Amino acid sequence: MVPVATFQRKTIGVTAVPRALAAAACALAMAACSSDPDRKMLSVVSWGGAYGRAQEMAWFEPFAESTGTEVSIDFFNGGLAQVRTQVNAGNVYWDIVDLDLADAARACDEGLLEVIDVDILAPAPDGTPGIDDYDAGELPECGVGVSYYAGVVAYNRDYYPGDKPETIADFFDLEKFPGRRGMQRNPQPNLERALMGDGVPLDSVYAVLDTPEGLDRAFRKLDTIKDQIVWWEAGAQPPQLLADGEVAMTTSWNGRIFNAQVEENQPFEIMWDGAILSMGQLTIVAGSKNLETALEFLTFATVPENLAGISRYISYGPMRISARQFVGRHVGTGVEMAPHLPTYPDNSKGALRDDWQWWGQHRDEMNELFSAWLAR
């Protein structure tokens, strides 16, 4: 069979109903869904936006073209609600889901994900086994690590013609750097930023956050800018808030700001001090109807050269050590990508590594406390 790449993009936000209806329709009329019942199928779920487009170009489309798999792409806003619903109902219609490390670990503990045999990972070019081609602690039981990304603070340099903000403390300094602040409506990683902005050293942030006094300290720091905060929920909003002058500074994903800088020539600057370094995971939903194809895709995407391909489209770095040698230039602009990645030495020296285990244990409690604080 000649490989054919077919994409069915369904932007469904945070509800799975359209896909559920589509799956039911296919169950009732399989011939209408595919003229070839033997064609391999795969449903992948990503975050959309610039990151989703980068994944599509680097992994989804090449996999479909090279294997003849019919790939459908859904987008969501994260979380485990939809995965739980599918698994608990015994009606799994997603195969591959991109999760942050905390959610991946939690879903694994709940039995919502397939356990991944690390033997599927291709060796590094020098023969190093795939499992040894990751930094320590970055390969959980139910996923494979693919990309480093960072939550950062960005500002419009036109808004500050004189002194420029340089540290995370400046984000909380409304006197020296006036203007509204954009923040994601989420406790993670705003609590960490508040403590860093209050002078807590990087290596003590989670130890302090793990105490009642530390939590109070974080919320008190957020109180100092609360009446100047513009809350955002979707990744496309921060650069738009900056461009429209709605905020002077905002938290954002580094890839969103990079794209606004190089593709739209926006006068934005990333402040790497206080960045939160996180790791994206590709996982397989427990009970996937296309398990063999899903495992084949994970093997394909994590080949070092393929893994580095995402850095050609967005400023996220590959997690495999050997893949970093294949990072090149941005497609379309020719910008050398290495200096824009969160793992670049000048960018990572003031960054905090996300403690996914802490958040896996405390997310529900922090969500409740954060909601209560918002309501006050």
Image (cartoon, rainbow, N blue to C red):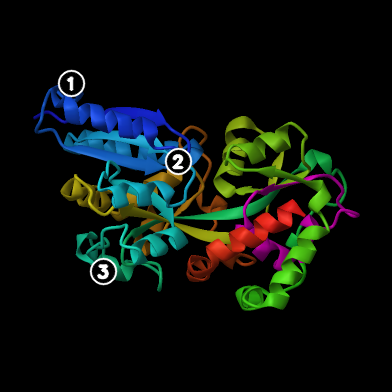
Q: Position of residue 175 (x, y in %)?
A: 91, 54
Q: Earlier in the sequence, mark 2 or mark 1?
A: 1
Q: Which of the two residues, 251 or 188, is positioned nearer the viewer here?
A: 188
Within 10 angstroms of label 2, few (less than 14), some, or many (20 or more) residues? Answer: some
Q: Residue at x 25, y 62 (%)?
A: 116
- Left of 99 or right of it: where is 164? right
Q: Is residue 157 visible?
A: yes
Q: Which residue is mark 2?
A: 76
Q: Nearer the viewer, mark 2 or mark 3?
A: 2
Q: Amino acid at mark 1?
A: Ala
Rounded to the nearest angstrom, the CA distance separating label 2 from label 3 is: 35 Å
Q: Amino acid at mark 3?
A: Thr
Q: Which residue is mark 3?
A: 128
Within 10 angstroms of label 1, few (less than 14), some, or many (20 or more) residues? Answer: few
In this view, 274 is above or below 25: below
Q: Residue at x 18, y 21 (%)?
A: 32
Q: Nearer the viewer, mark 1 or mark 3?
A: 1
Q: Quadrant of residue 256?
A: top right
Residue 214 is marked as none
Magenta-drawn segment: 169-197
